[in-house]
Amino acid sequence: MSAKLKSMLLEQLKNYTTRNVDIYKHLTNINVSYKHSDNIYEVNLSPRSKEQDVSDPEDESLMFQVDRNLVIKNVLDGIRHHERQVNTTPKKIVIEFSSPNIAKPFHVGHLRSTIIGNFIANINTYFQNNVVKINYLGDWGTQFGLLQYGLKAKNLTINDLKDNSIKTLYNVYVETNKLAATDETIQNEAKKNFSNIEQGTADLETWKHIREITVAELESVYHRLGIKFDQYEWESDYNGKAIKDIITLLEGNKIIYTHETGKKIARVNDRDVTVLKSDNATLYLSRDIAALIKRYEKYKFDRMLYIVDNAQTDHFNAVINIVGRVNEVCAEACEHVKFGRIKGMSTRKGNVIFLNDILDEAKSKMHEKQQQSKNTRKSAINKETCDILGTTAVIINDLKQRRKKDYIFDWSRALQTEGDSGIKLQYLHCRLWSLEKNSGAVLPDFCEPDLLDEEIIGDIVTELAKFDNVLQRAYYEQEACILVNYLFKLSRYVNRMFNEVKVKGSSDDLASQRLLVYYCVRRVVNTSLKILGVKPLYEM
Ligand code: ARG
């Protein structure tokens, strides 16, 4: 958003130097600090950014001292007129996230993957990359043989699964699992069932139905979070029959060999990893290897990101390592984007968590809170608002943490209205919107910086000028907390401005110019919330 400021500086620079200023044009870091005493801003441009391959010998930072008014005008006009940098080298980025398992609860690990993955997808889209969002659902493994047995034993048909399919499947699975613990015949039946599926000799119609119903239910939850996947993939798409060619390829390249136990083994970093069982049944690992190779054929991506928790580090190392030996370019493009665990998240219903339950819990807690609050306009309390507030709280509470850290979930902190929370950011957005609507002032087309001489405005413009840089850091480091913490800081400045700089009651020109500042702040908050995966509220 400070693209305008940057291009203004670069234009100026062209008049003074013969150095190649073009390299500073794209995705360049811009850092601004403000010195009240001298009425001067220091602006630093540097093209170096992680992952940016700038090998130009002149790629050092440029330091400018710029007149206060010039900065204010360029920053505010830039935001007012939606100036954006153009990404001249957009990339194809495949992002795989959420990826829960059928018949197992959508646990908090999947919740984090969903929230973080959505953020990473949004920020890549913001930077004009071509993003493909994939959800890779687990519908394979011996547990599905067990599930099949359970469904049959209980005489459950597809119709019985219509509502609440995920929970019903989960319950059947848990019950059958318990029975199987002491009953070997069930275990054997389950194994046989699964082997039939794996060998492609079972009737997969029921299975297809179960998948369809599950996706429909999941989609209603994703819809609540404003997430839409481009593609659902299934582990079962990579069953033994389907990936024969890949296994042959790995064998042909001597990447896997048959161990004396009959298993197919690969060496990865001096470790033996099993790729196929002795009966040639596929494993989580073999399916991922095949999925990756096939994805590359399909998408020819520049980057492939797996948003999956830390615990699967060895698994993804093995996947990428093995694929790298048949397709180096593909493996180079892959990254396991890891995150830590959340501890202590449970709902009133207990410990097993389904995403819907978490969101319902957040929503009902918000509802209670709203009703008790003195600040809330009672007319604004409705189910949708509470739902959005609840999801905002859960999302921001997660994204404000450093991605790789484990953290302890605390409902009261997530839902707090004071302090650094999602509720507070929504409240800020509403307050700015209401000021815009009720100020009576007219939003000007251009900034007249002479009218904006308050110190606090200087500080706020400094923050606004950093927005570009903040987004870039969040983007390169894949760390939403950089953006979230920026918003918390910005909101503290704006609260000061609310007290010190009034729009209502000021002369027309002054009111208009002040309104412009508030408007620009709201645009930045609005854009940020959307990137974070939150729907900005206008009234609460
Ligand atoms: N379904 C898996 C689980 O719940 C996560 C899948 C992650 N993605 C992958 N390509 N393996 O543990």
Image (tube, helix red, strand yellow):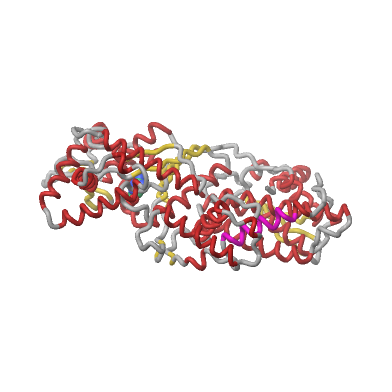
- Relative image position of residue 272 (x, y in whole percent): 22, 50
In this rendering, the answer to whether 468 lies above or below 236 is below
In the image, 313 versus 535, the foreground residue is: 535
Q: Quadrant of the C terminus?
A: bottom right
What residue occupies the far right of the structure in this picture?
A: 507
Total tally of numbered discs in the picture: 0
- Relative image position of residue 197 (x, y in whole percent): 21, 37
In this rendering, the answer to whether 532 lies above or below 299 is below
- Relative image position of residue 256 (x, y in whole percent): 22, 41
- Relative image position of residue 282 (x, y in whole percent): 22, 41
Query: Can residue 265 be seen?
Result: no
Q: Main secondary structure of the magenta part?
A: helix
Q: Residue at x 40, y 50 (%)?
A: 336
Q: Residue at x 53, y 59 (%)?
A: 393
Q: Residue at x 64, y 67 (%)?
A: 374
Magenta residues (range): 422-435
* In-image side of 147 versus 533 (left or right): left
In the image, 312 versus 513, the foreground residue is: 513
Query: Can residue 392 be seen?
Result: yes
**Picture quarter containing residue 248?**
top left
In the image, 188 versus 72, the foreground residue is: 188
Q: Is residue 401 magenta?
A: no
